[in-house]
Amino acid sequence: MLLNVVRGAQSFTDLKMVNKINYATFKAACFAYPKLNLTDGQVRNYCLLEIQDILNTHGKSLTDFKDHPQPNPNLLTNLDNRLLREALSFDANKSKVEHGKLHSMLNPKQRLIYEHIIESMHNDKGQFYFIHGPGGTGKTFLYKTIIARLRLEQMIVLAVASSSIASLLLPAARTTHSRFVIPLELMENSTCALDKTLQDILGYKNQARRNRIFGGMTVLLGGDFWQILAVIPNAKRPE
């Protein structure tokens, strides 16, 4: 659980450090985090909710069992909006300071891309962008600037990367597999939670977005294809 809330930990000692206090055990460190310190009632409700989810996969519900305790309906409502709460739980003032510092250092090409993407967000254009360039050209710097701008305006930003190491370069980012529940082994019947994630963000009321790519959201992809090794059929190891 600590790995989900402690960022940049480089040792087990770092995991037990909360507000500059080094706790003796991982359990004590968990209790020091408000997000991890659940009451008995909250634990009970979350357990009931997990049972409900398992039963739902088999076409059943806790309501089918007479006199069985039910999950708190307020908890269900909160969980439905968990992704939104997570995406909006940033300090706008901190993002404003960070954006001011980053934006002032953008070069002309970065600034042009930045303005196009921000315009797409403000005018609900739902544009699709791809930034390609070799390492060291400022792609990550540009991503951070855009993320800071959108978060200071309380807009929803989902930052994802293909690997855990890459995700550490972006603020509050996660791996693509983790965010969208993409299976590691792809098969014919494999599924992911991308559609559910879009529904959580966009809601169910805006029917006009259903026929737009990515639900009409502005999407920015980027990378360096030169870092991908070529695949040579029947090649030997030195090749």
Image: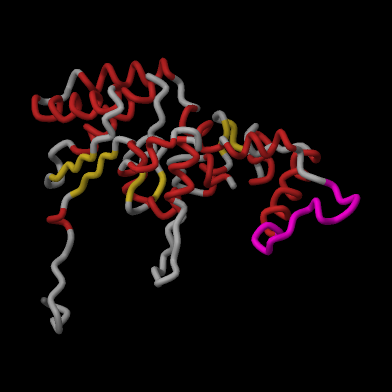
Quadrant of the image occupied by residue 79: top right
In percent of the image, x 34 and y 16: which residue is there? Answer: 97
Which portion, as a residue range, is magenta?
55-69
Report x, y in % for residue 227: 16, 56
Quadrant of the image occupied by residue 137: top left
Residue 105 colored in magenta in the image: no
Quadrant of the image occupied by residue 130: top left
Q: Which of these two is toward me, 12 or 226?
A: 226
Report x, y in % for residue 85: 53, 31
Q: Residue lying farthest right?
A: 67
Q: Residue lying farthest left?
A: 108
Q: Which of these two is toward me, 114 or 71?
A: 71
In percent of the image, x 43 and y 42: which residue is there? Answer: 198
Drawn side of residue 105 relative to residue 85, left or right = left
Q: Does 164 appear above or below 189?
A: above
Report x, y in % for residue 57: 64, 61
- Quarter holding the C terminus is bottom left
Q: Which of these two is toward me, 36 or 71?
A: 71
In percent of the image, x 12 and y 76: which residue is there? Answer: 232
**Magenta stretch prevailing secondary structure:** loop
Drawn side of residue 217 relative to residue 134, left or right = right
